[in-house]
Image: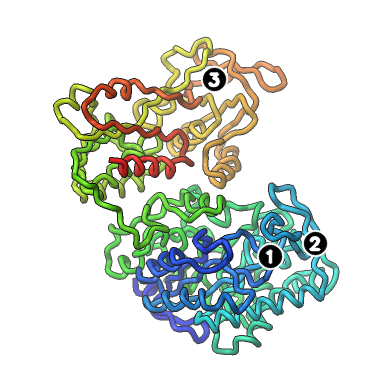
Amino acid sequence: MDKLFEKTKIGSMELKNRIVMAPMGSGLPEVDGTVSQKLIDYLVRRARGGVALIIVEYCSPDPVQILIPTELRLSEDKYIDGLSRVASAIKAEGAKAALQLMHPGRGAMSMFTGTPPVAPSPILFDWPFLEQPRELPKEEIGEIVDRFAEAAKRAKTAGFDAVEIHGAHGHLVAQFLSPHTNKRTDEYGRDTYGRARFATEIVARTREKVGSDFPILFRLSADEHVDGGLTLKESRIVARLLEEAGIDAISVSAGVYPFSLEWLIQPMLFRTGCLVPLAAEIRKEVNVPIMVAGRINNPRLAEKILEEGKADLVVMGRALLADPDLPVKAREGRYSEITQCLACNTCVAAERGMGPVRCLMNPELAHEGEVEPEADSPKKVVIIGGGPAGLEAARIARVRGHQVTLWDENEKLGGRWSWLISPYIKAKVATLKKMGVRLQLGKLIDANALQRIKPDAVIVTSGYSPIIPQIPGIEQSNVVHADDVLNGKVDTKGTAVILGGGNIGFETAEFLRRRNIQTVIIESGQEIGYGIERDARAVLAQRLPKYGIRVFNGTDVVRIKGDQVYYRDADGKDGSIKAGSVILAYGSEPDNKLIDLLQAGSYELLTVNHCERPEDVYKATQEGAAAARNI
């Protein structure tokens, strides 16, 4: 890890290593845009973990225009004191502190601001909550330029070591840069140079306000991945113009809200380091340090990027949510102890709902400094079901001082989604073993067994049974359940025809694709992939045809006979598909037989719901934790 932990500089700012924490919306500021203690605790925990530079989440320089209520603000001097607490707390732990400045432009919503959003051009896009923006006149553009510069000056006064101008992801600066959103014919439009003028004026004006010894960073979507949007070809020119204007580093990202969200915060289907090629190309154009993000979730990958000269610093976001101690663990060679980010985007779902950030891998996120209260008296607790709810229930019960045994009839823990969240399962099982939780796997448990164990309390995950539709031929031996395929209990033969295009059908198709099994999906409705995290669903929908997976929407299965699946499409036309295996993926319904049997026991009985959809894994863990806290 010679390169990763090599000292470096951005302008006049010296950094102890080359790891930067990305600016991520946390939902932790107060709703009036001021700093909360929870935000400080969250940032301090990352600083303590050994990162060199923390770029604090987006902060509005505008007195009116904001993206969400829990957005930091720096439009007036009254915000300086609170942000000064943030900067000093970060720096006290040995990290440098930067603040990202962002104007949402057309992304602002009048329900929060009381006024229409503004943009370079009055283009209305067909997307929920987006409104018709007002085109900015030239004099108002100049006012916004000044607001950015004044906010940067306030950030310097507050004790920050640098600022970052957010020119990516479809916010106002990016809206000016992109031909997709900037249709102006004046000096702020027309061509690449005109569209970059707003950004370069902000940089130049900011430099006047903060002086030559205060670094200015710029975040750039080097490729917006939208038709008519900013491309790498134009971004090369933009990067040179930004350097001429006085920036000290460029942070390379990609994507634009709301059209290519999967490139903003890449789901697990994206390869790690997916933005590195863009950064390498931008690095050829300028002489300032290049920072790169994009699923850089382990130190070996980060070291490789730096060694190959693809970037000068690596930007980690979700990786530091999952494990704030990643830098120090890497520096000490404790790689096996690093909790790796899954890119499940649980954290993103929280921000989109404007709630506090959360992480499947790190339940302490946004609860830094809080201590789980011990139980009044330790009890013998049995947990039945090793899915996400049961695993977290076991952890919380043990933390509270109970003697815990976890039972599951399967050898492999994790429930329905064990293959999808295997790193989570592996980390959680290792934690439980270290804590002294007894695991009884591959064993059935019933009321008689519980009588022998004599527990004080039992937490049981509700059972489920797969939905079996009334289709002629469904009882054939080549018809199997998706759960049995995902759990490895059955093997498929020939072409697999999946009946049901919801989350289970999609996940089964991806599971089989990884095993080079030809697959077809038949879905009676028009929507496919429901129940999967939004960005992952979008990626899967794009990739299924490329994988050779055919999808029949609005299609009903009429009957199954031998190796043929007969169907009727939305136009009423009949057809058939040859199938080696037919996989039922219609979802499930509750099965509470075990719970009913356990009701008569002389112990405290608590129940939690099984996890029906992959996007509900985090919710399941919280239900498990709540049950354990009630013992």
Q: Amino acid at mark 3?
A: Lys
Can you see residue 241? no
Farthest residue in the bottom direction? 212
Question: Do the residues under discs 2 and 1 have CB atoms within 8 angstroms?
Answer: no
The residues tagged by marks 1 and 3 sit, at their Cα atoms, a distance apart of 57 Å
Residue 134 numbered tag: 2
Q: Amino acid at mark 2?
A: Arg
State which quarter of the image contains the N terminus.
Answer: bottom left
Residue at image coords 44%, 53%: 358
The residues tagged by marks 2 and 1 sit, at their Cα atoms, a distance apart of 12 Å
Q: Is residue 289 above or below residue 505?
A: below
Closer mark to the observer between disc 2 and disc 3: 2
Residue 33 numbered tag: none
Decide which of tag 2 and tag 1 comes sooner along the chain: 1
Closer mark to the observer between disc 2 and disc 1: 1
Q: Is residue 372 above or below residue 145?
A: above
Q: Dot 2: few (<14), some (14–19), or many (≥20) neighbours within 10 Å?
A: some
Residue named by callout 3: 578
The quadrant holding residue 178 is: bottom right
Q: Dot 1: few (<14), some (14–19), or many (≥20) neighbours within 10 Å?
A: many
Residue at image coords 34%, 32%: 607
Residue named by callout 1: 65
Closer to the camera, 294 or 515? 294
State which quarter of the image contains the C terminus.
Answer: top left
Q: Is residue 489 above or below residue 138?
A: above
Residue 307: % across, % down: 42, 71
Residue at image coords 41%, 75%: 89
Decide which of tag 1 and tag 3 comes sooner along the chain: 1
The residues tagged by marks 2 and 3 sit, at their Cα atoms, a distance apart of 56 Å
